[in-house]
């Protein structure tokens, strides 16, 4: 079952934000941790949800970055400045990217563009949301445990969607937080997105397949529970295979990365006009994915 309304997922676990972009709050005996950073414009929603759900904001001592794309780190500067004691955790590659001026400029530009598209641009005059060089934290690697007190979170490195992508897994809850390194439960389908390296993305999906999952906690479009959660990664693997074939066929038909990407984007938005990413951003995503596949195809041909 797919649930897209913010609220309690289970005891100790909350989904916060909005349907199209969310974060998760994990509550342990010692402290709480936010998992992922969503898009910047959901800050006022989260603050209101803290009050509505009776969540103690002051217990939040950690924020875990699952990857460094703009739509997954948006709330972090605000909460780090609001609570300087919060420890921000991310992969080594994520911190490399988040120290680059160009990457920070792109995060801020894309975040404001999407906020404007969603009619939420006023949040930038009310809150300090931009990334700057004052946000730092600690690196986590494969297998590193994060202990919240009675709740232990394990880290898995799953490159492919991005070079810095990691997943979080709570074995005792059978809760998986795969960010976009899994599949996105949009509408009634699954969107697969191996932006940086589609081959690595597919291998990372296979890494996630053996995990027992009762709660599939996506960053976009909420979370999935029950039997659908148990089968979700297997379904994402099949969808990724189909997507790869589509991209390869589009490139072989055009022998042009840009033309192939535009062809696929036009078809996608004809069927999914309400997808949260603007067509220009999703076009760049497809260019990245097809560029990787094109290099492999050109080597063979």
Image: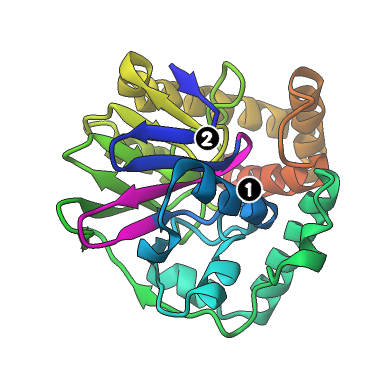
> Residue at label 1?
45
Residue at (41% x, 20% y) in the render: 235
Q: Tell whether 226 sits left or right of 51.
A: left
* Quarter occupied by the N terminus: top left
The residue that disc 2 covers is: 6
Q: Quadrant of residue 70?
A: bottom right
Q: Is residue 70 left or right of residue 155?
A: right
Which residues are drawn in magenta? Answer: 19-33
212, 287: nearer the viewer: 212
For disc 2, the neighbor class at 10 Å (few under 14, some 14 to 19, many from 20) is: many
Residue closer to the observer: 273 or 39: 39
Q: What x and y, as percent, mark residue 108? A: 73, 67
Q: Position of residue 76 (x, y in %)?
A: 54, 65
* Residue 197 position (above or below residue 127): above
Label 1 crowd (10 A; few <14 / some 14-19 / many >=20)? few
Dominant secondary structure, magenta: strand
The residue positioned 63% from the left and 48% from the top of the image is 45
Quote the CA–CA distance across marks 1 and 2: 10 Å
Question: Compared with residue 130, is residue 241 higher up or lower down, i.e. above or below?
Answer: above
Query: Disc 1 vs disc 2: Cβ atoms closer than 8 Å?
Result: yes
Q: Residue at x 75, y 29 (%)?
A: 264
Q: Is 37 one of the magenta-colored residues?
A: no
Which residue is found at the position 24% from the left and 44% from the top?
170
Quarter location, residue 186: top right
């Amino acid at each position: 079952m797919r649930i897209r309304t913010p609220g309690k997922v289970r005891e100790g676990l909350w989904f916060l934000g909005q349907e199209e972009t969310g974060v998760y709050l994990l509550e342990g005996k010692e402290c709480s941790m936010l998992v992922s950073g969503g898009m910047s414009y959901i800050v006022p929603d989260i603050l209101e949800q803290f009050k509505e759900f009776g969540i103690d904001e002051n217990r939040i001592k950690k924020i875990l970055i699952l990857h460094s794309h703009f739509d997954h780190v948006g709330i972090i500067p605000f909460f780090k400045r609001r609570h300087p004691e919060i420890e921000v955790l991310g992969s080594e590659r994520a911190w490399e990217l988040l120290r680059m001026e160009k990457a920070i400029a792109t995060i801020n530009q894309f975040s404001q563009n999407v906020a404007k598209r969603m009619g939420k641009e006023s949040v930038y005059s009310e809150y300090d949301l931009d990334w700057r060089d004052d946000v730092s934290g600690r690196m986590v690697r494969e297998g590193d445990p994060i202990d919240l007190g009675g709740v232990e979170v394990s880290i898995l490195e799953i490159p492919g969607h991005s070079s810095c992508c990691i997943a979080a897994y709570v074995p005792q809850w059978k809760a998986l937080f795969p960010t976009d390194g899994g599949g996105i439960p949009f509408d009634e389908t699954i969107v697969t997105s191996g932006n940086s390296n589609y081959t690595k993305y597919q291998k990372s999906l296979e890494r996630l397949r053996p995990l027992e999952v009762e709660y599939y906690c996506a960053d976009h479009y909420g979370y999935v529970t029950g039997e659908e959660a148990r089968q979700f990664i297997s379904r994402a693997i099949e969808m990724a295979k189909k997507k790869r074939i589509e991209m390869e066929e589009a490139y072989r038909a055009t022998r042009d990365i840009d033309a192939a990407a535009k062809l696929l984007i036009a078809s996608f938005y004809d069927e999914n006009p309400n997808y949260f990413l603007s067509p220009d951003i999703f076009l760049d995503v497809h260019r990245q994915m097809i560029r990787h596949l094109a290099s492999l195809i050109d080597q063979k041909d």
